[in-house]
Amino acid sequence: MRSAPACRVHEENSMRILIVDDHVVMRSGMRALLEKNKDTVVVDEAGTATEAVNLAQSGRPDVVFMDVELPGGSGIGATEEIVRNRWCDKVVMVSAHDSRSCVESALRAGALGYVLKTSATDEILTALEEVCAGRSYVTPELREIDWEARAPANRESGGRKLTERLSPRELEVLVQIAEGLSSKAIALQLKVSHRTVETHRTNLMRKLGIRKGSELVRLAIREGLIVA
């Protein structure tokens, strides 16, 4: 087992990590892996996006390992808030999603790393080492994909990527609409008003040149944001 890199020296000489995943088994497995290294300590665990933001704000961890899909909002949205407020600038996404749009959304939100839940344990430690050095890291499985062959370009927007046209919050709302959630349900999950969600919906359809909700669903599937 390789030793963990040192991001910052603390009194206890440990690298402080926050693990965010809504599955207890995943959190336990990640904790067991990371704490095999004597210089690493998992200081907190969170099961929702809101908990992740609150714990990052209060605990200021060195590194956050963040799931993408979380109750109460997405890990991408939580990452954006954490990084923007400088509560932690080293976030590694640990995801079941291998779509290009998801990876790009995570990196645009401020994540430095992106690995899959199926990644080998050594790769998790490699990602940790890279982000601690201030470098980005994306699992080789995703770097080697022929994205152009896998997902056709969006000709309606002159080939611009979806992540270049939408904010992280708009992408989050798009995914939830495509998954069949009502505006009321989305508002409850994101802890915003119904009117705010409707505004996001209107902006999405305007930016994407879409007139029907069903077209949003098809777009989300085509871009790999959800699985049909």
Image (cartoon, grey):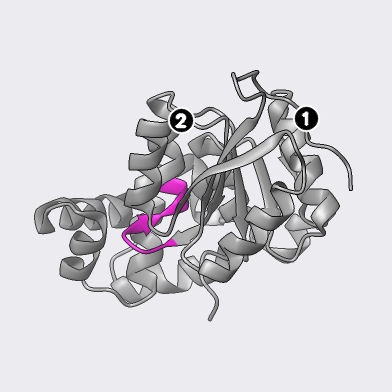
Asked if residue 76 lies in the magenta stretch, the reply is yes
Q: Amino acid at mark 2?
A: Val
Contact check, label 2 and label 1, Cβ < 8 Å: no
Around disc 1, counting alpha carbons within 10 Å, would you say few (fewer than 14), some (14 to 19), or many (20 or more)? some
Q: Position of residue 188 (x, y in %)?
A: 19, 63
Q: Position of residue 20 (x, y in %)?
A: 50, 53
Placement of 111 over or under 32, stated as above or below: above
At a point 53% along the width and 34% down the height, the residue shown is 110
Q: Position of residue 127 (x, y in %)?
A: 75, 41
Placement of 92 over or under 228, stated as above or below: above
At a point 54% along the width and 27% down the height, the residue shown is 89
Please, which residue is most extreme toward the bottom here? 228
Asked if residue 189 lies in the magenta stretch, the reply is no
On the question of residue 89 being in view, the answer is yes
Q: Position of residue 122 (x, y in %)?
A: 85, 51
Is 182 or 25 nearer to us in this picture? 25
Please, which residue is most extreme toward the right here? 1
Is 211 or 143 nearer to us in this picture? 143
On the question of residue 160 being in view, the answer is no
Q: Is residue 106 left or right of residue 13?
A: left
Residue 65 image label: none
Q: Is disc 2 placed on a helix, strand or loop?
A: helix
At a point 74% along the width and 56% down the height, the residue shown is 148
At a point 51% along the width and 68% down the height, the residue shown is 24
Q: Amino acid at mark 1?
A: Pro
Is 72 or 228 nearer to us in this picture? 72
Residue 83 image label: 2
From which residue to which does the magenta span run?
A: 70-77
